[in-house]
Amino acid sequence: MSDGPGAEDWRPIADRVAGNARDFLDGLTAVARGEGADETVPLLLLETAQVMLAGAQLGASKDVILPSNWEPDVGADPDVDLDALRTGLATRLAGFDDYAEIFDPFADTQATPFRLSDDLAAVAADLVHGLKHYEAGRVAEALWWWQFSYVSHWGTHGGAALRALHSVVAHARLDVAEERASR
C-alpha cells in the first residue's frame, strides 16, 4: 500500500470487514437452507445492513493501493456454493425475489429488473474472494479487493437489495397497520 497507512495500520479494519463478511455469509447460508422461516426477510435485511456498514467504512477510507498494482490469484472457486446459495435464497424469497431498481440514480432514467437472490449472491461472491486473501494472510490484497469491489460492484447490489428488503418489511408492517385502521 502506498501514500498512507502501512499493512499493520489496516489490520483493525481488515479484521472487522472479515468478521462482517463471515457473519453475512453464515447468515445468508442459514437463510438459504430455510432456517429463517417466517423471519427470512427481516433476517436478510439485518445481515445486508450490517455488511453494507462494513462496505461504507471501506468506501470512506483512503484508497488501498497495492504496491505492485497486481492482485495474486486466490485459487479455486470459493468454498461457499454460490449456485446453491442463490437457488436457496430464490426459493425462500418466492413472491418477492424480483424487483425493479434505478441502478445509477445519476445516469439511469429507466428501472431495471433485479432479483434479491442474485444481488445477495453477488455480494457473497465478492466477500468470499476477499476472505480468501485475508485467510492467506494477504491483508492488503483483501482490503484492496473489498474496497474496489464495494465501490464497483457489491456496494451497488447490496444497496439495491437493502432497499428492496426494506420495502418488503415496510409493506408488511404498514399495510397491516392500514388494514387494522380501516376496520
Image: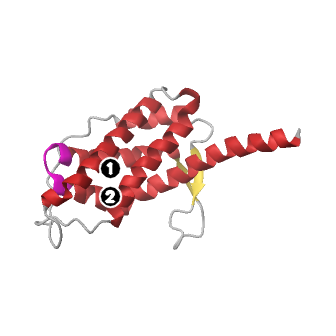
Residue 149, disc:
2
Q: Could you tell whether 86 is left or right of 64 in the image?
A: right
Check disc 1 and report its element: helix, strand or loop: helix
- Quadrant where the C terminus is found in the figure: top right
Image coordinates of residue 73 in percent, x first then y, are: 15, 50
Image coordinates of residue 35 in percent, x first then y, are: 48, 26
The amino acid pointed to by label 2 is Ser
Quarter location, residue 175 = top right
Quarter location, residue 25 = top left
Report crowding for label 1: few under 14, some 14 to 19, many 20 or more residues within 10 A (C-alpha): some
- Identity of the residue drawn at 47% across and 32% down: 31
178 and 120: which is toward the camera: 178
Specify the segment rendered in magenta. 133-141
99 and 18: which is toward the camera: 18
Check disc 2 and report its element: helix, strand or loop: helix
> Distance of mark 1 from mark 2, alpha carbons?
7 Å
* Labels 1 and 2: the sequence-earlier one: 1
In the image, farthest residue toward the left: 68
Quarter location, residue 136 = top left
Whether residue 117 is visible, yes or no, is no
Image coordinates of residue 92 in percent, x first then y, are: 54, 32
Residue 126, disc:
1
Whether residue 115 is visible, yes or no, is yes
Report crowding for label 2: few under 14, some 14 to 19, many 20 or more residues within 10 A (C-alpha): some
Image coordinates of residue 99 in percent, x first then y, are: 59, 50
6 magenta-colored: no
57 and 171: which is toward the camera: 57
Q: Main secondary structure of the magenta part?
A: helix
Q: Could you tell whether 85 is left or right of 139 in the image?
A: right
The amino acid pointed to by label 1 is Asp
- Identity of the residue drawn at 41% across and 54% down: 53
